[in-house]
Amino acid sequence: MKDLVDYARLNAAKMSYASAGVGTVTHIGAELFKSLAGARAIVHVPYKGAGPAIADVMGGQVQMAMPNLTGQVLKLHQAGKLRLLAVTTPRRLAAAPDIPTAVEAGLPGMVAQNFTALFAPAHTPGRIVEQIAQATRTAMSDPELRRQLVASGFEPEIDSTPEKTRAFVREEIARWTPVVKSIGLKLD
């Protein structure tokens, strides 16, 4: 990671990065990387999905990407076809404990993660929200389901609650708003 940051600072105008598309976490996460690394001239190359983006990184058409860490991406890394320098999660992933976080690897503030959550209309009765939350916690308590999720690159939150999820979403909005504004990203 340090070598990439150093290279990017000196050669940003020669570099490009692949994303799974405009507005994806693979796009705004790489924009955060550019900002933190002091390499704003790296060119964004948006693709129609992660597959073509990863293929072009492996083929050398673009120098880097920040793909979502899926089971397939881990297999490419393990096969030596793709080199994962760091994960951009707050802590190391259970499926890839040997890969450091970007923060550990020397890039403070480099946290960019996808999350999956269940959402309901704003005026859904509290008892229904709690029923859904309890069903989710029950499902997440299944060791086999957790094993499959971890193997696929997910980090299940076993003790999640609607309140924790709302707080997380608020924090993510506050964290990403400056990045989105700095690149002029707008909703279509």
Image: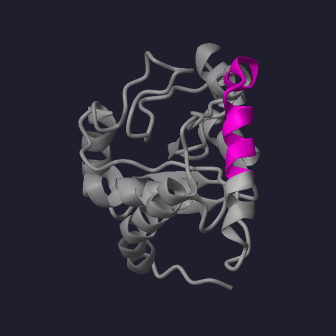
Which is more toward the observer, 143 or 40? 143
The vertical placement of 73 against 36, above or below, is: above
Which is more toward the observer, 175 or 24? 175
Left or right side of 162 for 35: left
Q: Is residue 132 visible?
A: yes
Q: Is residue 43 visible?
A: no
Residue at x-position 59% and y-position 43%: 67
Q: Give the magenta range.
A: 132-146
Residue at x-position 50% and y-position 43%: 64
Left or right side of 12 for 22: right
Residue at x-position 24% and y-position 45%: 108
Percent x, y of residue 53? 67, 47
Residue 64 forms part of the magenta stretch: no
Residue 145 forms part of the magenta stretch: yes
Percent x, y of residue 18? 58, 52
Percent x, y of residue 14? 41, 54
Quarter holding the C terminus is: bottom right
Q: Quadrant of residue 48?
A: bottom right
Magenta stretch, main secondary structure, is: helix
Q: Quadrant of residue 155?
A: top right
Residue at x-position 67% and y-position 50%: 133
Left or right side of 160 for 129: right
Which is more toward the observer, 87 or 50? 87
